[in-house]
Image (cartoon, rainbow, N blue to C red):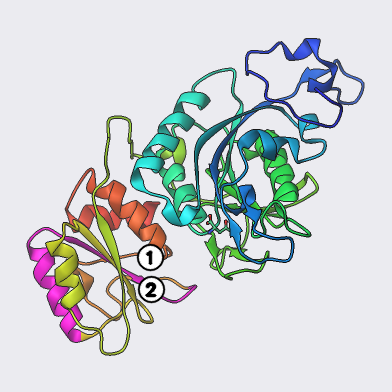
Amino acid sequence: AQEGQARPTPPSTDAASDPASTRSKGGRAAEPLPSVRILATGGTIAGAQGSPQGYGYKAGAFKVEDLIKGVPNLGKLARLSGEQVVNIGSQDMNDAVWLKLAKRTNELLASPDVDAVVVTHGTDTLEETAYFLDLVVKSDKPVVLVGSMRPATATSADGPGNLYNAVAVAASPEAKGRGVLIVINDEIHAARNVTKTNTTNVETFRSLNRGPAGVVNTGDIHWYEKMDKRHTVDSEFSIAGESALPRVDILYAHANMSPDLIDSAVKNGAKGLVIAGVGDGNMTQPALDTLAKHVKKGVVVVRSTRLPSGLVLRNNEINDDQKGFVASGELNPAKSRVLLQLALLETKDPTRVQRMFEEY
Ligand SMILES: NC(=O)C[C@H](N)C(=O)O
């Protein structure tokens, strides 16, 4: 391996025999660097521009080895190895890839040879994949997701700096037990809290209700408050024996919303519905009546909001107890959908699902 370059290293490699893979602290004997496995899934962080001037690009053009080699000094933070799980734009993310990624993450973290996992991912659905892993990973070892807004070939590509910071966070002992994290644009966010807020700007990921979990500047980390919600080792959800997830659709409320799409979703197999409601999770009377009809037949309905921040409060504008609806609290529609998919593996009882939306 060249100085300053990471190289794919099997986790079992004897780190002590390799000076580049140890660090010494305050004159004490050098201790081996943590072993971090990078799971690559594609996205703009692995994307190439069609032309140097072009704004458009092809996502998922580079492989995990290219990403690791593209970041100077990455190998000084951790003993790195990589594997390609898929190579897709995250707009194409789906349940099958989630299950594959979660099972692989659990398998790796169960091994004493792996100290942390970094997942490279497109930004469009980064928050959903992160929250899914937050609920089903059975380890308190760090899991960090990272993406970029500009392709690898762009002027001022943001991917290499983001990956450097992501590996630094994953290698940090203090990242343990904080749940799944997203590192991007010099900030660390809890998977549950973060959302993409801008279509193209590098400053797009925000934890609007609670603020970030910390900041990281060229690997220098400052942590903020820990999150008080259930995740990872404290989560009741497991995908160990699952080969598919229940279908949950999101419907966007608006003036003059008709109930037709609700009926259509249920007819096409949705077991749960999330409404991106207006304001505090509201919608037209015909939509409310149609949802209440489906609740009586066992469909679970979660009221979230199309607004970027704020909580959807139970029994505030709408009597959820009477209609059998679940209020999403802080969870936006995309995250409500993830939690509802996992909840439906266990129950169709809205009271139990409401309890989950309060605890996670
Ligand atoms: N910036 C990005 O990564 C966007 C891309 N469409 C993706 O999610 O894969």
Q: Which residues are magenta?
A: 285-309
Residue type for callout 1? Pro
**Earlier along the polypeptide chain: callout 1 or callout 2?**
2
- At 63% from the left edge and 39% from the top edge, which residue is drawn? 175
Indicate the position of residue 160 as horizontal and vertical percent values. Answer: 73, 47
Q: CA distance from mark 1 to mark 2?
A: 7 Å
* Element at label 2: strand
Q: How many marks?
A: 2
- At 27% from the left edge and 35% from the top edge, which residue is drawn? 243
173 and 160: which one is in front?
160
Name the residue carrying label 2. 305
Check if mark 1's residue and mark 2's residue have beta carbons within 8 Å. yes
Indicate the position of residue 37 as horizontal and vertical percent values. Answer: 60, 29
Residue situated furthest bottom in the rendering: 256
Labelled disc at residue 152? none
Labelled disc at residue 333? 1
Indicate the position of residue 38 as horizontal and vertical percent values. Answer: 60, 34
43 and 336: which one is in front?
43
- At 16% from the left edge and 83% from the top edge, which residue is drawn? 286
